[in-house]
Image: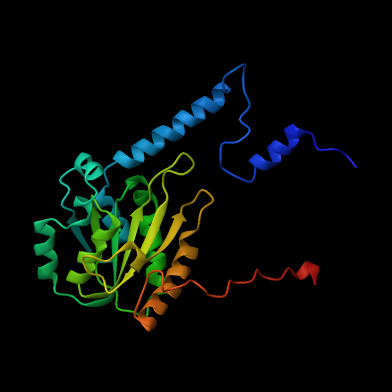
Amino acid sequence: MSEVVPGELWARLRRTTPARIALGRIGNALPLGEVLDFQLAHARARDAVHAALDTAALEAALAPLPVLHVESDAPDRATYLRRPDLGRRLSDRSTALLAETGTRCDVCFVIGDGLSATGVQAGAARLLKACAAELGDLAIGPVVIARQARVALGDPIGEALGARVVVMIIGERPGLSVHDSLGIYLTFAPRPGRSDAERNCISNIHSAGGLSPEDAARTLGWLLREALRLQLSGVALKDDQTPALPAKDPSRA
């Protein structure tokens, strides 16, 4: 039986995780390649936080779905990052716009830039369409694109549109492994003042080894129907659906 030397063991472990482990060293420093890789990941994360969402391009990608545009009470990105509370409140203009819409629906989808407009730009349209396909038997309101948005901004939007459930698709806080991840937050009977304990979250949705949009949509579909059946969401609503079994390999029969 051959022995596994430490270097081979670390190499195996590195293949199982995006974490920065066993980077090696040159003298007392990291190898140049690892330093440059870290700097690139850090730059991408910073860019994702500060990037502006191209709302026109996102609306085009969502076609033919009807779209409304709103913004939070944070007037610009710098204020948004310093004042999370303003990102949870609608601007006066947006409040008036939604009051004039006069729609009622089972589900209202909100797409918020959050802390990664990069992730929203890259994947939100595909994710929303996958979610809508899972909910074809429900009344879905117009898609709301929200700038300078925090998760709780979905509460006043959902209330204004008379939604039984609001689903916020938002850019997640970027890290040094993933800078373009999306999260889904589901809230039953949305209204200002809802706490995070009253929401269900599906996170880590991205193309670099994360949850696929289609898998996230299936999970959302199950949770949303349970939320409507039980008339609740959050910690009281557990994702206890039976996991799908892998298809049987006929060659092993």
Residue at the outermost bottom position: 229
Percent across and percent down for residue 132 are 37, 70
Residue at figure coordinates x 19%, y 42% from the top left:
79
Residue at figure coordinates x 41%, y 47% from the top left:
180
Residue 64 in view here: no
Percent across and percent down for residue 202 are 43, 62
Q: Quadrant of residue 34?
A: top right
The C terminus lies in which quarter of the figure?
bottom right
188 and 40: which is toward the camera: 188
237 and 124: which is toward the camera: 237
Percent across and percent down for residue 247 are 67, 70
Task: Judge from the rendering whether residue 56 lies leftward or rightward of residue 212; answer left or right.
Answer: left
117 and 250: which is toward the camera: 117
The N terminus lies in which quarter of the figure?
top right
Q: Is residue 250 above or below residue 75?
A: below
Residue at figure coordinates x 9%, y 69% from the top left:
100
